[in-house]
Amino acid sequence: MDRCPDAPQPLAGRTIGVTRAEQQAGEARRLFEAAGARVVDLPALVITPPDDWGPLDDALAELEQFHWIVFSSTNGVEAVEQRLARRGGSLARRPRGVRLAAVGRKTAALLDELAAAADFVPPSFVADSLIEHFPVSGWGLRLLLPRVQSGGRTVLADAFAEAGARIVEVAAYESRCPEALPSGALLALERRQLDAITFSSAKTVSHTGQLLQRSFGERWREQLSGSRIISIGPQTSGRCRSLLGRMDAEADPHDLNGLVAACVQALRGPATQI
């Protein structure tokens, strides 16, 4: 990878484990390598279609009856665009009264690429911020929430329903656990070579635990000793604490750039568990 010789590389000499989905590791790798790190892929998610497209297709068939579509991930955007395309439509050509909200810079950027710019992006890249700063009252609104089939938060649906909105939550994709970690990743864990392991969702934490247990047995947490545990946001941090017993740093902002910065900060000094 070409780099400017004068570019700061605060992670030079560090080895970072990245647990993003197999299909989505490229951007994280690029950012960590730009900071000088050696990246070891620990793919902990496989993104697949939901078990049944029916509920999403039914919602999209009556899209003109919704006031907002609220996207909490790029996976949801891609799924909705794909299913609309099958009907000869697109998000860019959605009914005039349907507005779009996006949690996160990458989700908003993908909507931009599809010529369907988000009408609202919250200042902080977490679902709670979207609810707090939503530009209109929820009362009487009909909202479509395309989401992961299992394991996602219900906070958006619950909060909007409490505000008087009518919510339709539909499975747009599923994030499943891979069969096994790559041999290179297992070797790096066995040799305790990872200075930090980054987690970008609560599911990556849970699936990594499952994968490590399959490979190393009941004492699998020992393979994480010596590695800083870095989380992308509050929900992920909670899962780190409950499953791994610790969390050393949390990204702020809650995106990939924040994750890199949190790694840099955590590796500057002795571990301080949070």
Image: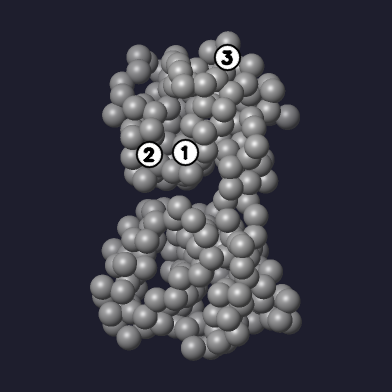
Give the label on residue 190, or none.
3
Where is residue 4, by image quadrant? top right
Give the label on residue 206, or none.
1
Where is residue 32, by image quadrant? top right
Q: From the viewer's perspective, is residue 107 above or below residue 213? A: below
> Quarter holding the C terminus?
top left
User: Could you classify mark 1 by the number of other residues whose Cα lies within 10 Å: few (under 14), some (14-19), or many (20 or more)?
Assistant: many
* Residue beneath the point at 61% across and 68% down: 52
Task: Using the image as rendered, state which of residue 100 and residue 240 is in the foreground.
Answer: 240
Between discs 3 and 2, the one toward the N terminus: 3
Q: Residue furthest left?
A: 162
Q: Secondary structure at mark 2?
A: helix
* Residue beneath the point at 31% across and 74% down: 161
* Cα distance between the residues tagged 1 and 2: 8 Å
Amino acid type of the residue that numbered disc 1 sits on in the rendered structure: Ser
Give the label on residue 16, or none.
none
User: Could you classify mark 2 by the number of other residues whose Cα lies within 10 Å: few (under 14), some (14-19), or many (20 or more)?
Assistant: many
Work out whether residue 265 can be spotted: no
Work out whether residue 233 can be spotted: yes
Task: From the image, tell me which residue sits under label 2.
Answer: 239
Task: Using the image as rendered, state which of residue 181 and residue 28 is in the foreground.
Answer: 181
User: Could you classify mark 3 by the number of other residues whose Cα lies within 10 Å: few (under 14), some (14-19), or many (20 or more)?
Assistant: some
* Cα distance between the residues tagged 1 and 3: 19 Å
